[in-house]
Image: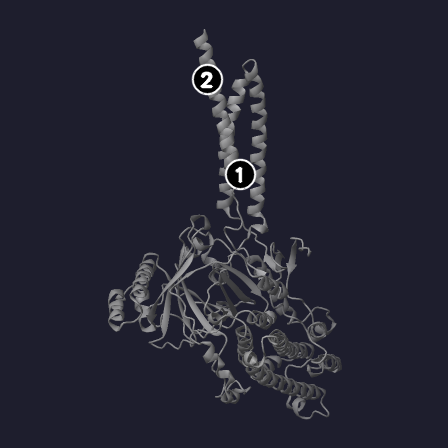
Amino acid sequence: SSTRPSNRLRHHTPAAMGFMEKLEVEVPESYRPYYLRYAQLKELVVELARSEKAPRTRLVSADLMDVNEQPVGRFQEMLQAELKKVNQFACVKHEALYLGLRRLCEDTRKLGKRAGPEERPAELQRVSERIEEMSQEIVHLDTYVRLNYLGFQKLTRRFDQYLGVSGSALFLGGLHSEPFCNVRFDDILILLGLAWAKWRAAFASAEQAKDATWKPPESFIRNTAKYWVKPDKVVLLKTRILQHLPYLIFGASMVEQEKLLEPFALLDLDYDERSQFAGTLEESQLLSSVYFDSPDGACYHERIRREEGARLVRFRWYGENNLEDDKEIYVERKIHHEGWGGASSAKERCILSQRDSFDYMKGKFDIDGYFAKLEAEGAFSAKARKSMKGICHEVSTMIQQKRLQPILRTSYYRCAFQLSTSNEVRISLDTQMSLLNEYVDGGHPAKPWCHIASDVLQKEEVYRFPYAILEIKLQNVSETPLWLRQTLADIEATQVHKFSKFQHGMAFLHPDKISMLPHWHQDFQEWHELQSQFRARGRRSPAASIRSTDSLDDPIAPQLKATIAPGGEGHMLKDMQNLDPKAVFANERTLLHYAEKGLYSGTLAVALLHMQGASQLAGGLMALGTVLYFLWALQEYYARLARITGRAAVAKDKFGLRLDLAHGPLIVVGLVGLVLLLSLARAAEGSGAHTLG
């Protein structure tokens, strides 16, 4: 039997390894000759820095032209040669994966026709192994792109710092347009998903294999868990999920995804980001939301205190927003319900055109007329229109009464995984999240209703979140599937209880408007301080930089205080620094209620001890039982308090972690019943003695 890791506190952070250490640990031997020759170029930079007689302020043209005589030019020549090598390998490898996956999809589709009943298990196993090999190659290609970009970044920054110049920003700016940075992982990941889908269809039921297009419901009942995932583990995570769940691409069925298998799809194999033949089917979709709150953060405080019925309003859209009048804006209202009430937290929405968003926000929009028009056009079902109309009125009233206005925006790329015929397990993954300040003192006075691309923002008004956010939604499923728990452990995911993009944005974009901070805030605050120290080191003199042993690596993510999650397969659980005061006070009230019942038996015990004969003996036993009862109640109080304050109390299933005492009521009923029984017996005894007398 396997042993579970101890639930001890420890720091959890992306490994602070250099380029060469990562190369040794993460890269297979067959890939290493095609990587950037980092060690040689690093030695050349140090050699150039030591041979410099005086620090430079800029590079001169001769440095870049006369490479035979100028050492700096020699570095530039080697850098360009390495860049060319990396570009060629990445493009060739991507094309090989693309074509190989197309062939594999075709072979998998014909699997059922070729293999007989006896041969099918062995054939399925063989194809499964081929798909897994392709999955590993995709992960290796992702590592190749990321690690080489990191190598170029570190080399050019080191070059600038050691020689006292500032050319790395220009080089890195151009690096984003290089072919190896524009390899389309969307295509090969969708093809990988198709291969696994066809493999599953070879033995799955017809209901699972049939084509379907998923459409989002108007209302969501949520039972979710959220995790932070390091960016370099995202592709690995996707390949693991695709083995069990297909991509859920909004509005695109499996048949539409299979367009990648058509011969003309080969024309899209272009690695220039400006190409007009760039692929149009993407596995991730840009999603933006503008959250509303009052200037004093009333909604934020209701949400972070988890008040029953706390509501939050946001306007959401999908894809780019160029202020088109007919752009669909989803007006959403989220409401929080405590688990003890039996109701689940939910999100409901209605749809408006962008042309109407400003008037709606200002309370000048004719809601009844709008829905009458929808009814005349036959848009949506009668039930959907009724639900959306109610939400539309509710949100409008809430905006006006609470003086809500746009306060922050979240933008990220989301991909989702789910069987189109089942809602039991739905997984979404948000990457490259940016938070943007939308607050305007006094509210937006005129259209547009939110910031546009031409608006000038300060650096502190934009916040980039360093992790991908994984969300797992379960419906009618008691626990996370085993394969998913193992995946979470392999990618070193960190589960974060009640993580909120809105709360994170308020904590770092509007700290002056709030009085409470989310429990993960401290880790990010320390991370920001480390980044400030890193930037300060970058301003040292070239000579001091060469002598220093400090790392030149920018801390890319916070150092998290986390523990091994109880009940998992080894993934991490974010350490909670705050307590729920409602649960603590409820625990104290429960202790007082139990103590009150103990007073009944204690009073009776004292009365019996003052009597003679058998009553005195019964009083002694009752007194002993009362003492044991009080000790039991106190022990249960501390045990429950430990569960409330302990990290094991962070459970995804609100009903899976019981804080009540299942046997407590029986003990209290037994104690009170005994008190009544003895009281009645004593009363009957006294009545009998009086009659005889």
Query: Residue 90: which quarter of the image?
Result: bottom right
The residue closer to the viewer here, 619 or 11, is 619
**Dot 2 alpha-carbon crowd within 10 angstroms: few under 14, some 14 to 19, many 20 or more:** few
First in sequence, mark 1 or 2: give its number: 1
Q: Position of residue 150 (x, y in %)?
A: 64, 76
Q: Is residue 208 visible?
A: yes
On screen, 241 above or below 195? above
Between the C-alphas of marks 1 and 2, the distance is 30 Å
The colour scheme is one colour
Query: Residue 688: which quarter of the image?
Result: top left
Give the position of the N terminus as an image quadrant: bottom right
The residue closer to the viewer here, 579 or 257, is 257
Query: Residue 370: which quarter of the image?
Result: bottom left
Residue position for label 2:
683
Q: Position of residue 455 (x, y in %)?
A: 42, 74
Farthest residue, direction top: 693
On screen, 408 above or below 565? below
Mark number, residue 663: 1
Q: Amino acid at mark 1?
A: His
Q: Is residue 52 visible?
A: no
> Of helix, strand and loop, which one carries label 2?
helix
Mark number, residue 617: none
Q: Are marks 1 and 2 in contact (CB under 8 Å)?
A: no
Q: Amino acid at mark 2?
A: Ala
How many numbered discs sit on the rendered protein? 2
On screen, 305 above or below 690? below
The residue closer to the viewer here, 117 or 285, is 117
- Residue visible at 44% across and 13% down? 687
Left or right of 228 in this view: 510: left
Q: Position of residue 6 (x, y in %)?
A: 67, 53
